[in-house]
């Protein structure tokens, strides 16, 4: 049976978070640990992340009403939920009246397990064997103890995309607000990529905060065609700095 995709699908990364800022500071200082008080799930947006989220919301607000999101699927992490909330406010999208907001745990960040809060230096210092294993296996298949691989993320996203095609296929317009790995893994699924293809995209650059990748339903109504990729014009138009920090902790790229 052919998949029945939404008319428009946007996939956006959350705005810059306090965790992104703390990770950069720790990496620059050569620290082992990223100094942040929050659980990963509770890490809020930075002030710049708030500005970026509002800028993206203003861009959505300028779209014709018939082209704006009808459904927002959002990670349960605070930085993603706040991005969605600020975006809706700036776009003038009222929950329940103009847009349906759904928090979905399948869109959560990839779990880092025992590597959580460690810098690149910290991973090499505390877990040299894991660092070597990860370099050999590659991030697509490597699963840190207590954490997840990209394949694990893709497995839960297969369930999410099945729900999207079942419940929002045809004429609906759906916005996903989540995390960098989620954006790339969604691209892997929608664009029918393989390991080499998605890792090459990942090697080229991190996904900018509040960047949008979008797809439009083809004329036959069964396939999504890429429209925008890591689109940051809404930030540039608003004068909001574009940031491309990796989510913490950042392991070396293969």
Image: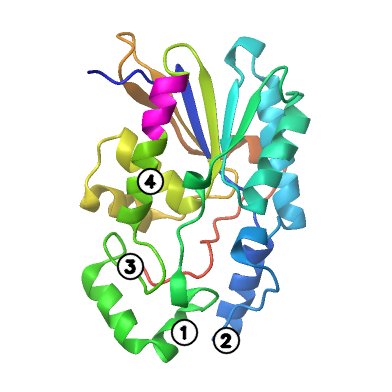
Residue assigned mark 1: 121
Task: Classify mark 2: residues with Cα within 10 Å, few (<14), some (14-19) or many (20+).
Answer: some
Figure colour scheme: rainbow
Please identify, in this view, whether the residue under mark 4 or under mark 1 is nearer the observer.
4
Residue assigned mark 3: 143
Residue assigned mark 4: 156
Please identify, in this view, whether the residue under mark 1 or under mark 3 is nearer the observer.
3
Lower position in the chain sequence, tag 4 or tag 1: 1
Q: Position of residue 62 (x, y in %)?
A: 69, 21
Q: How far apart are marks 2 and 4 (CA)?
A: 33 Å
Residue 166 shown in magenta: yes
Lower position in the chain sequence, tag 1 or tag 3: 1
| Residue 7 sits above or below residue 89 on the image | above
Task: Classify mark 1: residues with Cα within 10 Å, few (<14), some (14-19) or many (20+).
Answer: some
Residue assigned mark 2: 31
Q: Pointer 1 and pointer 3: residues touching (CB < 8 Å)?
A: no
């Amino acid at each position: 049976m052919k998949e029945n995709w939404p008319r428009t699908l946007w996939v956006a990364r959350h705005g810059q978070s306090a965790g992104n800022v703390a990770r950069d500071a720790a990496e620059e200082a050569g620290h082992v640990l990223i100094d942040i008080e929050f659980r990963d799930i509770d890490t809020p947006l930075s002030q710049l992340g708030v500005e970026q989220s509002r800028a993206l919301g203003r861009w959505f607000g300028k779209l014709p009403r018939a082209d704006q999101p009808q459904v927002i699927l959002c990670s349960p992490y605070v930085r993603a939920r706040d991005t969605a909330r600020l975006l809706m406010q700036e776009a003038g999208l009222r929950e329940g009246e103009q847009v349906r907001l759904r928090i979905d745990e399948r869109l959560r960040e990839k779990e880092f397990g025992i590597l959580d809060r460690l810098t690149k230096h910290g991973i090499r210092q505390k877990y040299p064997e894991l660092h070597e294993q990860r370099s050999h296996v590659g991030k697509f298949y490597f699963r840190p103890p207590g954490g997840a691989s990209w394949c694990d993320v893709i497995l839960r996203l297969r369930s999410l995309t099945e729900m999207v095609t079942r419940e929002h296929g045809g004429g609906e317009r759906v916005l996903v607000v989540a995390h960098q790995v989620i954006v790339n893994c969604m691209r892997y699924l929608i664009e029918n990529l393989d390991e080499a293809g998605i890792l090459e995209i990942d090697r080229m650059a991190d996904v900018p905060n509040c960047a949008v990748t979008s797809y439009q339903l083809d004329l036959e109504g069964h396939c999504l065609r890429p429209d925008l990729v890591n689109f940051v014009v809404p930030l540039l138009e608003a004068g909001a700095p574009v940031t491309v920090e990796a989510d913490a902790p950042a392991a070396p790229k293969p």
